Image: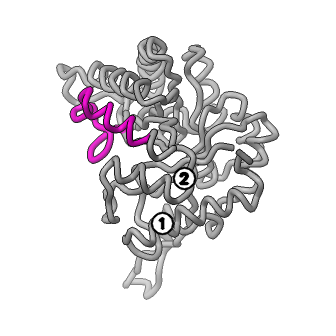
Amino acid sequence: MQLGLFSISYGGLWGQASLDLRAFVRKAAALGFESVMLAGKRPHLSPLDMNPEAVAALRDELKIAGVKCAVVAAYTDLAPANAAEVPFLDMQIAYVESLCKIGSQLGANVVRVFTAYEAPGQSPQANWQRVVTTMREMCDRAAAHGITLAIQNHHDVGLHTSALLELLHDIDKPNCKLGFDAWSPALRGEDLYESAKLAAPHTAITTNADYIRLPRYRYRPELVNYEPAIPELVRAVPFGMGFIDYAEFFRGLRDGGFNGLATYEMCSPIRGGRTIENLDHYARTYLNWMKEHHLADKS
């Protein structure tokens, strides 16, 4: 597999140290990554800031560093909005299309997207159909730039692997694939090997991080006791030290035929603090784990 690093890891959004986009590219190269996934929002690859001069400068930076921009990550939520008169879906279609154009100019061939969150009072069937219709238009616009859209399995609509594959069937576009990760199915109790093997033929990328579960309780003074609070708190730890069985996950992906891009991310508070040195330690740990488990390309 080709190993990548997600720029959001150095975006500073969870109190961590941050790097600007060009400094991040140099960091990824220095750490030994072959490719990068660039976050399609500030402080990184926002369409608001990426004029032709900025795109050219970033393309030069990637070339000098010897790192490929493989994926641009869009941040979408295709759920209904409270203000019906505001064209939220139109805005997101235009946003994804602009990232496809920028990504193509940088050499990327994938833009990562999300489906939609659900909220009380919404119709699950209406949400599903809204996602399908919007994704179909996004795919058509992405195709004009040679881009595949990869649905990451994080948002509520189409979350379970069987539902995600059903959603993909309904979208029915050749440039709509999956960004299939272990984090969500592991938390929800899916069999990681079987889910990964099932999703693998449809998967364009996978994004990886490891976590521990921290049980929560609430004190009940009238009982002089505690009651369990759910769900548990989840916290990021160095790769291979958490509860996610990545050996089985990657075995399932490989047995299902996937040998594409595996990208590491730090997108939450992490054990050990927020310094650049700690972020670098996490990134190196991922690289080492993947190599030790024979999951890295030999090139």
Q: Is residue 96 visible?
A: yes
Question: Of label 2 and label 1, which has the lower sequence position?
Answer: 2
Residue 140 or residue 123, whichever sits in front: 140
Quarter where residue 73 is shown:
top left
Check disc 1 and give the amino acid type: Asp
Which residue was labeled with disc 2?
Answer: 264
Could you tell me which quadrant the C terminus lies in?
A: top right
Which residue was labeled with disc 1?
Answer: 280
Check disc 2 and give the amino acid type: Tyr
The residue located at (55%, 22%) in the rendering is 176
| 146 shown above or below 55 | above
Spot occupied by residue 209 in the image (x, y as percentages of width and height): 56, 57
Spot occupied by residue 246 in the image (x, y as percentages of width and height): 69, 56
The residue located at (46%, 47%) in the rendering is 65
Q: Which residues are magenta?
A: 40-62
Residue 286 or residue 206, whichever sits in front: 286
On the rendered structure, is 51 left or right of 124? left
